[in-house]
Amino acid sequence: MAGYLLRRLVQSVLILLGVTLVTFFLLYVLPADPVRQIAGRSATAETVESIRRQLGLDQPFWVQYGRYLWNLLHLDLGRSYLQRSNVSELIWARLPPTLLLMAGAIVCELILGLTMGIVAALRRGTATDNGLMIASFVGVSAPQFVVGLLMLYLFGVRLHWLPISGYGTFAHLVLPSLTLGILGAGWYSRMMRSSMVEVMRQDFIRTARAKGLARRRVILRHALPNAILPIIAMIGIDIGIFMGGIVVVESVFGWPGIGQLAWQAIQRVDIPIIMGVTLVSAVAIVLGNLLADLVTPLIDPRIRLR
Amino acid sequence: MSDAVLPEPRRRTALARLARRPLAVLGLVIIAVTVAAALAAPWIAPFGRDEQLFEGLTLEGAPMPPGGAFLLGTDLLGRDLLTRILYGARTSLVIGVVANGMALLIGTLVGVTAGYFRGWAGSVLMRFTDLMMAFPALLLAICLAAIFTPSLWIVALVIALVNWVQVARVLYTETTSLAERDFIAAERAIGAGNGRILWLHILPHLVPTIIVWGTLGISTTVLLEATLSFLGIGVQPPEPSWGNIIFENQTYFQAAPWLVFFPGMAILLLALAFNLVGDALRDVLDPTQRGRG
């Protein structure tokens, strides 16, 4: 176990190193010039060159990348080109709203997805089952910005039940979380259904029934815990999917999180922020996957880590 | 075991089994209608693609709601929404096919090469694939699309660069297990070269997987294009795309919700159709591959 963990951690660090190299290289070769953005359209060639020198952007690729890694080693993500603060401070300040949004989305997708999956499995082959599975396909196929805008229109503009944008209260959290969670709800309902169907076929369920337990008790005490556990392990993987979705969802709902920070930085070619957000996302994805792999054998002792 | 191509009867039963699934048939119908609409757009569209109609705006300059001459209403510039959606189907389908085709090609090349040859080259390829898995796909696509000057082909390229990873992983796993089978060893023993083995014996066995992932991938591609266009960094107006119709009219959607609803439904239906067909194909072609795609 310790050996496995060590190997995975080393692998993760290498992957993250690769992510920084690829992102840095892409931003280096792509035809967007951050200096032009900083200096503005009317700047003279001399001003542009002097800013370029100040930021060290006139240096060769390996020198720039080496300096970035050296700073990273000291936990310094650099300074934003356009906002006068450190990237780590900017990200740190935006982290709580994004984490809150993700937590909300996880709650939504679990409640919706697991309920749909369980009901579909217990009513297998009926119209309810078919209807729920179509709904899960719709959830997986729905573009998040459309879901967001339409819910915003229905619950915010027409019904006035919930605020249309902003951040701060529980009411503000509902629509963005639902929007972010609907995709996952679609996946979870399908996985939960097949997991439940699989468990209901097992011998120990037949035994439980045979000894005369009520159907309700068989489902709640014997089937559900076994069917849900493998699904819970997937939550780690969701984090990676969320990292993309937050850019869209936060922009639709004016949510002051990392997604908006990234979107603004991308539009203004603020490279240190783009690098920082990409790295934070990659860390989240790698940790999420690692967590999912570590939790699985704890839940199901038949699976051993190698 | 060494049948190179699926024998004819089995292929037919696969199609017949697909035809017995109502959801798959529904998906196929939606796809067929979309393709027909895209091809026939110049003839069936009630107005010109970018035509700004005088009667397409109210006296106050607001878009017209659905009904009357404008079946789905008009947009902020007084253009007929139905016409724009019909032409937008072209964008979605072209990008769906081109971008997904490129992603399949890259994914197949990487996955099969790494799985068949193994060695250090295979390791490097798969470590690179792992690395790409750690990138948030949408964030990477947004970043690339924003920095390039956007055009239809750049959008397709960006999507392909982001979407090949899953295909590569799945085909890698399948190829490694295929390459160890006895019939491949037998081929090698009678002197067949790598090219012959790959082309005649490995690839044909991967065809079902490629078809399934190809179909599901179009759904992802359609959604990704719509998202990039919605952010204003995908297909650029006046060229209509379902995503950029929403982008252009977003500021006004509280007063004119049809400008989000109709194009949004178009995106949803097309993505849903490819998901339904892809999922049914997976069950029909390979019952062992069910689960999270």
Image (cartoon, rainbow, N blue to C red):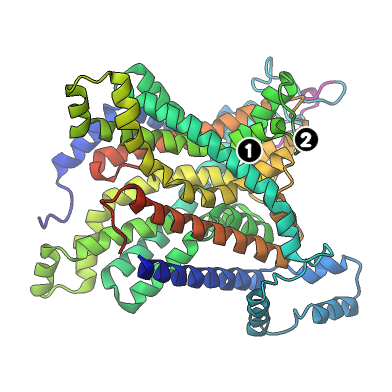
In the image: residue A52, left or right of residue B28? right
Q: Is residue B274 above or below residue B56?
A: below
Kindly indicate whether the residue at mark 2 contacts the one at mark 1 (C-beta within 8 angstroms). Answer: no
Residue at label 2?
B251
State which quarter of the image contains the C terminus of chain B: top left
Residue closest to the far top: B68
The spot of residue A189 in percent (x, y) is 42, 33
Please tell me whether residue B52 belongs to the stretch shown in magenta. Answer: yes
| Residue A217 in view here | yes
Q: Chain of mark 1?
A: A
Closest to the observer: B38 or B141? Answer: B141
Residue at label 1?
A145
Q: Kindly identify the residue that appears in the image at 29 percent across and 73 percent down.
A: B118
Closest to the observer: A225 or B55? Answer: A225
Q: Chain of mark 2?
A: B
Q: Quadrant of residue B278?
A: top left
Q: Quadrant of residue B167?
A: bottom left
Q: Is residue B267 above or below residue B132?
A: above
- Boundaries of the magenta span: B50-58
Q: Quadrant of residue B279?
A: top left
SS at mark 1? helix
SS at mark 2? helix
The spot of residue A25 in percent (x, y) is 61, 73
| Residue B37 in view here | no
Mark 1 vs mark 2, foreground winner is 1
